[in-house]
Amino acid sequence: MKKLFCFILLLFFTGCGWHTERERATEDVIPTQVVYTPSQHEVRTYTTCYNGHIQMHTVPNTIPEKWNTVFTCRHGGFVVNSKSVYNFCATRVGQTVKCFYDEVYWVKRDKQKQVLKKKLYDLNFIGLSHGSLWVLKENEHF
């Protein structure tokens, strides 16, 4: 068992040759819908019984507001939750805008750095442009 644990740790720290790589990509997308959901606040009350004592508990629950924009693209469609993207697309619903994103791949290379396997893992939204206007998702940088 101890040898198995050491072997797993060795694999974990040396890796199996898989790592992620990003490739910047662009494509034309169409914002089809903008959806604002206001924040909601509620207080839930529940009772418990412990050793014959009844206790009442209140738990505040806050659901934050959401600023969603729905897009159609060559991959099918996607949703971005961002106030700046929502504001940018609110007047551009149905118009074509350019989308910038990263394609994230799992890549396995041999010792000579040649690609053995490459699998698309994720698409990370970065921003949009329409003419000379740009908008980036919050916390994104070019």
Image (cartoon, grey):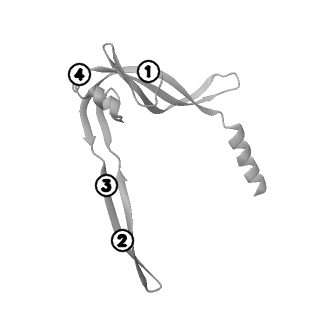
Distance from the alpha carbon under mark 3 to that under mark 2: 17 Å
- SS category of the residue bearing label 2: strand
Which dot marks residue 41?
3
The amino acid type, in three-letter code, at marker 3 is: His
Q: Nearer the viewer, residue 77 or 39?
A: 39
In this figure, which residue is indicated by the disc labeled 4? 95
| Label 2 crowd bin: few (<14), some (14–19), many (20+), radius 10 Å | few
Quarter of image, res 2? bottom right
Q: Residue at x 32, y 44 (%)?
A: 65
Q: Is residue 39 visible?
A: yes
Q: Are marks 4 and 1 in contact (CB under 8 Å)?
A: no
Seen in the picture, residue 37 relative to 126 is either above or below; the reply is: below
Q: Position of residue 78 (x, y in %)?
A: 34, 34
Mark sitting on residue 25: 1
Of circles 3 and 4, the one toward us is 3
Query: Tag 3's secondary structure?
Result: strand
Q: Which is nearer the eye, 22 or 80?
A: 80
Q: Position of residue 16 (x, y in %)?
A: 66, 37
First along the sequence among labels 2 and 4: 2
Q: Amino acid at mark 1?
A: Ala
Q: CA distance from mark 1 to mark 3?
A: 40 Å
- Among numbered discs 4 and 1, the one appearing first in the sequence: 1
Total numbered labels placed on residues in the image: 4
Q: Compare marks 3 and 4 and give the one earlier in the sequence.
A: 3
Q: Whole-Å distance between the Cαs marked 2 and 4?
A: 49 Å
